[in-house]
Image (cartoon, helix red, strand yellow):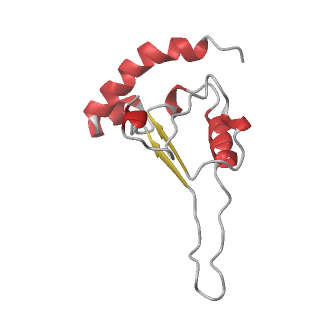
Amino acid sequence: QHIAQAKLTNVFLHDATVEPLGQAVDTYDLVTIYDVLHDCTNPLDLIQQVKASLKKPTKPNDDDTDDAYVPFFLLADIPAAPSLVQSLQQQPPPATYFAISTCLCLSCSMSEAG
């Protein structure tokens, strides 16, 4: 709704639960994922789908008239240490967010087959 109001024609919100990214090969300049990866039942598959969905990078022309093109994947997730105790000692707020997310999201992720 806000994208339409701002009259942006080059911004899309994509819901991978409705249309898997695997169907969007060589499509996007930028893919962002916020607070999602830790809830995925198959995070490697998601990352591979994102990689395939990004447009292919290009090299600059020899005559210096065109810059290289590089697509971007921006991933932001809860920082965590290797153990819960380390996370609580080093980063208490993110560890708390992760614990809440585990209670709320893990049951949803576990409901998927596989």
Residue 90: quadrant of the picture:
top left
Give coordinates of residue 66: x percent, y percent: 58, 78
Residue 68: quadrant of the picture:
bottom right
Name the side, left or right, on which 63 lies relative to 31.
right
> Which quadrant: the N terminus?
top left
- Answer above or below: position of 28 versus 104: below
Give coordinates of residue 71: x percent, y percent: 57, 58
Give coordinates of residue 59: x percent, y percent: 65, 74
> Which quadrant: the C terminus?
top right
Looking at the image, which residue sits at the far bottom? Answer: 63
- The answer to which of 90 and 3 lies nearer the viewer is 3
- The answer to which of 1 and 24 lies nearer the viewer is 1
Residue 87: quadrant of the picture:
top left
- Answer above or below: position of 20 versus 105: below
Name the side, left or right, on which 103 lies relative to 47.
left
Give coordinates of residue 73: x percent, y percent: 53, 50
- The answer to which of 24 and 110 lies nearer the viewer is 24
Count of numbered tags:
0
Which residue is rendered at x = 67% and y = 40% of the image?
Answer: 49
Name the side, left or right, on which 66 lies relative to 1.
right
Which residue is rendered at x = 50% and y = 30% of the image?
Answer: 38
Name the side, left or right, on which 4 lies relative to 49.
left
Which residue is rendered at x = 43% and y = 34% of the image?
Answer: 4
